[in-house]
Amino acid sequence: MGRAMAVLTKISSSPVIDRIGLRKPLEKALTSSVKNGFKAVGASERVFTATKKLSKPQRLPRPADPELFDLEPTEEQQMIVETVREFAAEQLRPAAHDADAKLETPDGLLARAAELGIGAFGIPEELGGFGTERSVVTNVLVAEALAHGDLGLAVAVLAPSAVSTVLTQWGDADQQATYLPSFTGDQPPVAALALQERGALFDPRKPKARAKRTPSGYELTGVKALVPRAADGELFVVSADLEGRGGALFVVEASTTGVSVKPDPAMGLRGAATGLLELDAVKLPANALIGGGDPKVLQETVRLSRLAWCALAAGTGRAVLDYVIPYVNERKAFGEPISHRQGVAFMVSDIAIELESLRLVTLRAASRAERGKPYAREVALARKLAADKGMWIGSAGVQLLGGHGYVKEHPVERWYRDLRAAGLMEGAVLA
Amino acid sequence: MTINLEVPKKIAPLVNQAHQAAAEVFRPISRKYDRAEHAYPKELDTFAAVLDGMNQSGFGGGAGAAGVRRSGGDKKKPEGNVNGANLRTVLGTIEMCWGDVALLLSMPRQGLGNAAIASVANDEQLERFGNMWAAMAITEPSFGSDSAAVSTTAVLDGDEYVLNGEKIFVTAGDRADAVVVWATLDKSKGRAAIKSFVVEKTRPGITVERLEHKLGIKASDTAVIRLDNCRVPKENLLGSPEIDTKKGFAGVMETFDNTRPLVAAMAVGLARAALEETARILDEAGIEIDYDAPANTQHAAAAEYLRLEADFEAACLLTLQAAWMADNRKPNSVQASMSKAKAGRSVVDITLKCVELCGALGYSEDSLLEKWSRDSKILDIFEGTQQIQQLIIARRLLGKSSAELK
């Protein structure tokens, strides 16, 4: 530290940095590195209270069982996807570059997503939403369409829905009445599903974060990583090991004593402003526990979350394919478009093949999940493809643009960084 | 209209029957005919009769190539979602090839020639040839993938065509009753002049020169066929006799949209066989595959297995997609090629990796794994190699002609 300070002093005394206009950025960088500790979550004024009582929790029913093999989405799904695609093209793609550079979700993006009803269609009508059934396939299609715009911003947009979906699926009447109505308004809370932790070979079924019982409820201690918009967070659903009995989910309001955050900028997902969430002996009431602490709830949450990441990878993979096709057709080398070479053309074919593969395996997992069929295997396979082939697509995208793919003038380098997340992320989004 | 990628209930009995047949008829004789290359698998005759009965009893094209007929006189787009002959056929093929690919290729009356007849024959021809066992003869000694380079000639002489040339790699060429031969009416007119002809084996001038000795699929005979002034009635030409340079090659190539998913299905069935056997052997070795644990937290063999199984799943769904699109009369050239490319390369990777995972047992003739990893290689070659599929897909995606993207 001492030596670093010495070097910095030398640099800052040099007149050169004033001449080239580096003084301000340098000072800013230094300030943020000094403030590097955890701090309490931003000033959320929101108070979560139940405005009406529910006699029993509201669940969304499953869609009807189809009889035939079919790859055609329902008319309603087609309509939703078309709207979301447009939203992604108009609101996400143009904002993606700056959001990535600034590590922040653009002002008002969530409100505009709320106008579109992205949060409300997964919430039962009794709680102010307009969800009529629980369709995992629809959620997958929506995530895919959003990620075609930008993966990081798609995570920011979808993060609150992960929390509301957990509560719709497994929350009790009290939890639902307290939290869900706020998700259907035009200013939905900044909320995040925090499962991820640091450490190699992390298994989300076995969180290191610990929950112990207290006379009044629970006490949570641990650190969660890559939590979307943690700094502005108002509400978290957090996984923790419940006294050695396996992982359980807890509702944690950001304003609770002992909750603090710190920026966790990463390789990608930067538009989602990821942060570390620290829980230091956070005291929670007894009704913070979701689904009675049944480890199956966490298990299910992990599967559905991986599924959503597969859908995001498919959406961004499609963005790569759509971007490289015109590029390799227009870019000339040795007197003709580079797409006239098999070495280039076959790479485009392989992107298309592996993308379609990832998409179909993801859809099968989703359609099984929404019908209540076993789907652990299908999710695992989709996840494997997202990790291997999804990343390969990102890499091939940069490769096809060559040096131009490596600079920020083109989005492929961002997609490369974002696609790395899809194979390792747990939580944050949910199908 | 709602996304569902499960095998529909109404096809389940057919899948079940095909699986029984594969387990009870193919598997017990699988190794026997791998060792006795060129011996005729006589067990299949009885079975073929049963299969004919199955096909006539309304199951329609459950396990062979005859089920891929598209037009059937009714060219109207079907109402609503159809799970028809194409889907049934790929599902049946997957099951049969779980049993043995080479034996399926040797099934009487289920040759690729039958698929060609089923896809493009008119009703009169279907009547005459429908019950024959038809092989397919495209490749010649001087070309493989470049099927426009056909040099076998067909010259109209009165009411007959006179065929001359040599065809190689004719699957079931010795055992079949007839051979569908690709020949050119006029070499100077290029692709448009290439037509296919049904040549019955009883006609003078068609001879089987020899049978190949191969790496795998040994139960299936691969013949060299010579046509020496072989005369066929002009009604044996499949499709239109006109040389339409605008339409070009499209007519004969159409067959591939139906047959490529079939070859992909063969790869899917074979891959599943290898994966199931490997899972069993790994289980005996105490390796468990946990679908909920991250792959990297598991035994390296389990993580590798997950990777292979993911490729298998992808190949399978791509194949079902291509067949479903054919059933619903959606243009499926790209998807057919995707299924073939993915299934072809995956089955080779999967079967070879399964041998590696199972070590000396996998490599020994005491298990079928080594046989499967020899059988699999042809599936990435015939009906269009991996590279040809990639060309087709790339040309379509990039909007390039075959002159631009060679």
Image: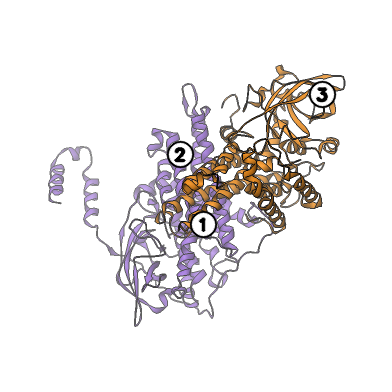
| Image hue for chain A | purple
**Residue highlighted by disc 3:** B204
Label 2 close to label 3 by CB (< 8 Å): no
Disc 2 from disc 3: Cα separation: 57 Å
Q: Residue furthest top?
A: B188
Residue A75 in the figure: left or right of residue A414: right
Chain letter matching colour orange? B
Residue B117 in the figure: left or right of residue A344: right
**Residue highlighted by disc 1:** A379
- Labels 1 and 2 positioned on one and the same chain: yes
In the foreground, B214 or A69:
B214
Q: What residue is drawn where x is 57% and y is 37%?
A: B377
**Residue highlighted by disc 2:** A397
Helix, strand or loop at mark 1: helix
Helix, strand or loop at mark 3: loop
- Image coordinates for residue B222, horizontal then vertical, percent: 67, 32
Question: How packed is label 2: few (under 14 Cα within 10 Å), some, or many (20 or more)?
Answer: many
Label 1 close to label 2 by CB (< 8 Å): no
Pointer 3 chain: B
Going by the numbered disc 2, the residue's amino acid type is: Gly
Going by the numbered disc 3, the residue's amino acid type is: Pro
- Image coordinates for residue A398, horizontal then vertical, percent: 42, 38
